[in-house]
Amino acid sequence: MALRIIVLDFDGVVIESNDVKTDAFRHVFTRFPQHAEAMMAFHHEHVSLSRFAKFEHLLGLLGKNDDQSLKAEIAMDFSAIVVEKIMSVPLVTGAEDFLQKVTPILPVYLASVTPAEELSLILDQRGLTQWFRGIYGCPPWTKPSAIQDILALEAVKPEDVLLIGDSAGDQRAAQMTGVRFLARDSGLRFDIPAPLAFADLNEITQYVEKLL
């Protein structure tokens, strides 16, 4: 099978930002101490859900499902923490080398559960935008819908596309869309059967070069 397109997740694949997100969730959830522990458990159980889905779950626990003002306030607080802290966290080992070696050969897309506007800001400030043919954030995209859009834009078959992710959510997105999946082991859980996983982008680069 030919490999024609690569789609990368962002957090935990390009940049070591999973802990930043977890710390930001812990910060905003401590505002509601009666639900903080349950919400952190919900976060860890549903790592791949968008932040907005998690905030909606919190509003449900609070009995404030329709309080869009509170939801927006929490989201702004969360985003401010993430944008500040993510600027100083390192890239995943081998990420820069991967991008330098692979992007001249294959189109590489980015698909993340980070909101599109925030993702664009982070990529610009980290000098990463140039590497990606297309960038998809959530909202407005889900990962499966982003992959479907890439398939249509590039006019390729699902088996020609490789999604590289670090979570069960990424794994499920690949299954839903029929694309191939390769895992970066960032410490998050995967569904069974476990996918082929590598420690960093150096190892993934070597694997991708063999596919080419």
Image (tube, rainbow, N blue to C red):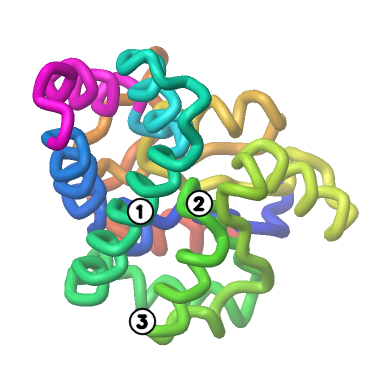
For mark 3, what is the residue?
Answer: 126
Q: Count residues near mark 1 (Cα–Cα under 10 Å), then give few for <14, some for 14-19, many for 20+.
A: many
Let me know if residue 40 is in the magenta part: yes
* Dominant secondary structure (helix, strand or loop) of the stretch shown in magenta: helix
Residue at left offset 27%, top offset 41%: 185
Disc 3 versus disc 2: distance between alpha carbons? 16 Å
Residue at left offset 42%, top offset 39%: 71
Is residue 93 at least partly visible in the picture? yes
Compared across the picture, whether 100 is left or right of 104 comes to: left
Residues 56 and 145: in front is 56
Residues 19 and 182: in front is 19
* Dot 3: element: loop
For mark 1, what is the residue?
Answer: 11
Compared across the picture, whether 90 is left or right of 121 comes to: left
Disc 2 versus disc 1: distance between alpha carbons? 7 Å
Disc 1 vs disc 3: Cβ atoms closer than 8 Å?
no
Query: Where residue 198 is drawn, which disc sits there?
Result: none
Q: Count residues near mark 3 (Cα–Cα under 10 Å), then give few for <14, some for 14-19, many for 20+.
A: few
* Dot 1: element: loop
Which span of residues is magenta-colored?
31-46
